[in-house]
Image (tube, helix red, strand yellow):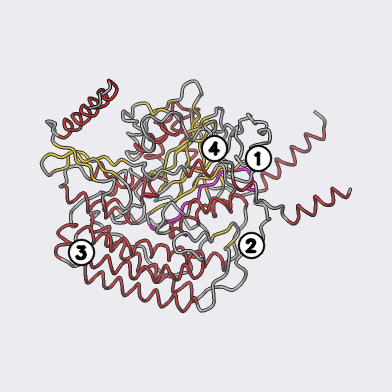
Amino acid sequence: MSPLSSADTDAEATEAVETPEVDEAREAVVALFREELGDAVLDHHIRPGDDLWIRVERAAWRQAGFVLRDRARCKAFGFLSAIDWLPSPYGLGEDSPTDAPPEPDTEIVTGYAGGDTRFQVFARATSHSAKLGVTLKTDIPDDDLTLDTWLSVYAGVDWHERELREMFGITAIGHGHLAPLYLPGEFEGHPLRKDFPLLARHVKAWPGIVDVEPMPAEAGGADEEASE
Amino acid sequence: MTAISDRQMLAYANAQAADGRVNLEFETQDGMTLNLGPQHPATHGTLRVVVKLDGEQVVAAEPVMGYMHRGYEKLTEVRNYPQVTTLVNRIDWLGSFANEVPFILAAEKLMEIEAPPRAQWIRTVLFEMSRIANISLFAGDMSLHIGALTAAFYAFRDREFVLNQIEAVTGGRFHPNFDRIGGLKDDLPKGWIADTKAAMARIRDYCDEMDQLVTGNEIFEARTRGVGVIPADIALQYGLTGANLRASGVDWDLRRDQPVGLAWDQADWQVWTHPDGDSFARFWVRLQEIRESTKIVDQLLDGLPSGPVMAKVPRIIKVPEGEAWVATENPLGEMGYYVVSKGGLGPFRTKIRTPSFNNISVVPWVCRGVYVPDVITILASLYFILGDIDR
């Protein structure tokens, strides 16, 4: 380590202190979760005055649900779904079918409140009294795509967990009736996973490819490059 | 006579066996199975409700959807941000403009830009007009399911005035695709404000007409009062939102309680609730909501600020890395987009939280023990759009 780099970090630290925006209501919710769940709260992220994310361990998922409903008083259930953090191997699907496919990027970069695995389940509920919403997240390891059901927490999670099973292949243990919601029973695969191709794009190339004209600024830039 | 092959014989036997299975299901000890839909008029599209009956009483009701599943969440992953509004327009097709707004707001939140005030006001006006177009049809539709055909004609007639005004601004009656990141595509046309105020007056007349025709009607009250009661805690657990929640006595409206930058706080209006939680309450709350919406539109048009309708945005829209959740009080309830961006041209993942999905998930709970005709009024009063369930 050079002295320069430590000076840099110091500067960053003081900058962070200088921004006094502290969201007390949301900090209090995080404190509640830490009090109830201890180390099972892995990380959190607050956008002051706007939103709150908390990531908990998968083993504490249901307990976190009860804390969310009863302690944080988020009685109004919003939704439950998942994110597949694997970058899509197919890109935007707008590449010319004759060109070589783009080099697939396999590095998994997760969002707010971090994450360790490819699949992340997230759910949201709102507290009407405090007028704030909380997004809970939990990581689902690849070799065991399961988590506890939230049916005993919010009855309305029923269809959301069916959708989760259908679209991501993540099973809510204890749900009991995870029949597909949208697709026919014989459908194979989990469409919202990133490695599930959007077949329409493969059958017929994106028509936008042919009629995209370069933006004026871009065209100018290209000319300059050409003249050079 | 041509010989029948083994294959044909087998197919015939299988078909017979399938018929047998259906009959068996129809005549079990537990009663009979009735399919409402997928083409039933009460389903406004193609929802099927499988109802198990004991006599005329419902033992279990299970909605079956997916007939309208278009996979918008997957499609947004191969679109860039400006293209997504074209898709989400088609989620709730009766109040399309309102679908665009939360998505655009989520993108704006991630980009940390804000539309100029005039754009925010016009957005609010168009948002409320979508609500009027959507809910005025509901009032007619609900009466239709109870047997009052006239009200439905009135609804279609008067909704047209609002749609004409939306068309005059956006060029589209149903799919405006008018909202842009950073503002709006265009300003209002000349003479539009006066015409819109006239249309709002018409809608208020329409509400009065509906009140006279339907609200106090003896048959209507008999069919809806005390039918399909949803208590507040059940409504919250199932994630019911919008008028369905307010009809259960929960005083919660995102327009007032979690404002997202639009101009609702600039107008004087009221959130209506009803303590009963039955089909009648849901109808009544919605009718009041249209009245409030016309008030909002009138007031905002009076005080419309001048200025540009578009903020400065780059020509090629790249949204910085981050996650954003924006929900607004759409005609059907809370509609929200959870947008995950990785800094690209298009969203990495979009979770579309539609109100009807949650609103209809309460059907198995609320239909248990009611009679067959009440299933229709309950479905009508919960009010859903198929595209809004299936996405």
In the rendered structure, find residue A203 and report the number of the disc placed on it.
4
- The relative height of residue B379 versus residue B31 in the rendered view (above or below) is below
Kindly identify which chain the residue marked by label 4 belongs to: A
> In the image, which is nearer the foreground, mark 3 or mark 1?
1
Q: In this picture, which residue range is highlighted in magenta?
A: B318-331
| Mark 2, residue position | B311
> In the image, which is nearer the foreground, mark 1 or mark 2?
1
Which secondary structure lies at badge 1? Answer: loop
Residues at marks 3 and 4, common chain? no
| Mark 1, residue position | A96
Q: Residues within 10 Å of mark 3 (few under 14, many from 20)?
A: some
Cα gap from disc 1 to disc 2, whole angstroms: 33 Å
- The residue under label 2 is which amino acid type? Ala
Residue A96 in the image, given as x and y percentages of width and height: 65, 40
Q: Residues within 10 Å of mark 1 (few under 14, many from 20)?
A: some
Residue B228 in the image, given as x and y percentages of width and height: 21, 50
Q: In the rendered structure, which disc, 1 or 4, sits on the residue that comes first in sequence?
A: 1
Which secondary structure lies at badge 2? Answer: loop
- The residue under label 1 is which amino acid type? Ser
